[in-house]
Amino acid sequence: MYLLRRQTSMAFAAGMCVFPGGVVDPRDFDASVGWAGPSPAEWAGRLRTDEATALALVCAAVRETFEESGVLLAGTRPDTVVADTTGDEWEADRVALEARELAFTEFLSRRGLVLRSDLLGVWAGWLTPIFEPRRYRTWFFVAELPEGQRTRDVSTESSSVTWLSARGAVEAVEAGAMLMLPPTYLTVLEIGQCGTPAEVLAAAADRTVDMFTPELVDEGDKATLSLPESLRSLAESRSR
């Protein structure tokens, strides 16, 4: 798994290890975007949202992945994917996207590319608890690193990046060597039950996501956050 350690100066999740990601740009709703793979209508069913929002979420996922890792899930045809994004012109476009000086739709169109929505799977959805001053509705997506591409430490929001096995990341968090917010940790823990990237994508292929909001649970001498029922036994097995 590709993980970024957020700058300690960040207002939210400072110092935490996270996946590439960010916020939806209003221009991500542009329906003229070059598109290949499952339609926005199909994604709306998976993401439990309307078609316009589903399109924007998938666009944001692909755009933010490129902005924060240099990996681009797009190709010149529905059955191809860009092989290398490390050149100076690619980097100039990445910086312009990150600065919101360039719209994602314009970027793809100018390069003759279509977004490959079939290379993505959706894994989970979390909404920060009501007591948090900053609240985010977050969808977790999964994708395999395209052949020929490689990640680059380019995000201005991270102090370091790493590739680490899912199980290795879980062990690092549990040993106190790495910090993660609960949704990230639980996502990594669940994905770690799969043996290969292909198994992860297969498990995500027919998933639909209902947004889960953790609540405080009073356990007498302490309070904990509630978990999705589907993850309860897995999480409890790690605390024994």
Image: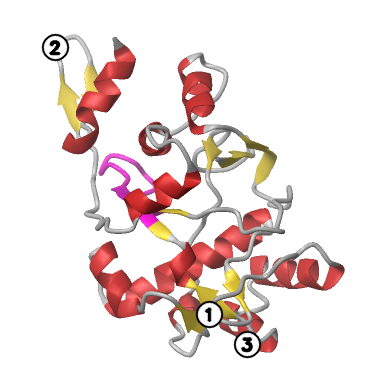
Q: Give the class, few, some or many, for how many residues have Cα within 10 Å of label 3's Cα (few <14, many ≥20).
A: some
Residue 125 lies in the magenta-colored region: yes
Cα gap from disc 2 to disc 1, whole angstroms: 56 Å
Residue under label 1: 78
In this rendering, the answer to whether 148 lies above or below 36 is above
Which residue is more in the foreground, 203 or 53? Answer: 203
Cα gap from disc 2 to disc 3, whole angstroms: 58 Å
Residue 220 got which mark? Answer: 2
Residue 21 got which mark? Answer: none
Residue range in magenta is 122-140
Decide: marks 3, 1 in contact (CB < 8 A)? no
Label located before the other in sequence (3 or 1)? 1
Cα gap from disc 3 to disc 1, whole angstroms: 14 Å
Q: Amino acid at mark 3?
A: Ser
Please name which of the two marks, 2 or 1, marks the residue nearer to the observer: 1
Residue found 58% across the figure and 59% down from its top: 65
The quarter of the rendered structure image containing the N terminus is: top right
Judged left or right of residue 29, residue 81 is: right
Label located before the other in sequence (2 or 3)? 3
Residue 149 % position (x, y): 70, 58
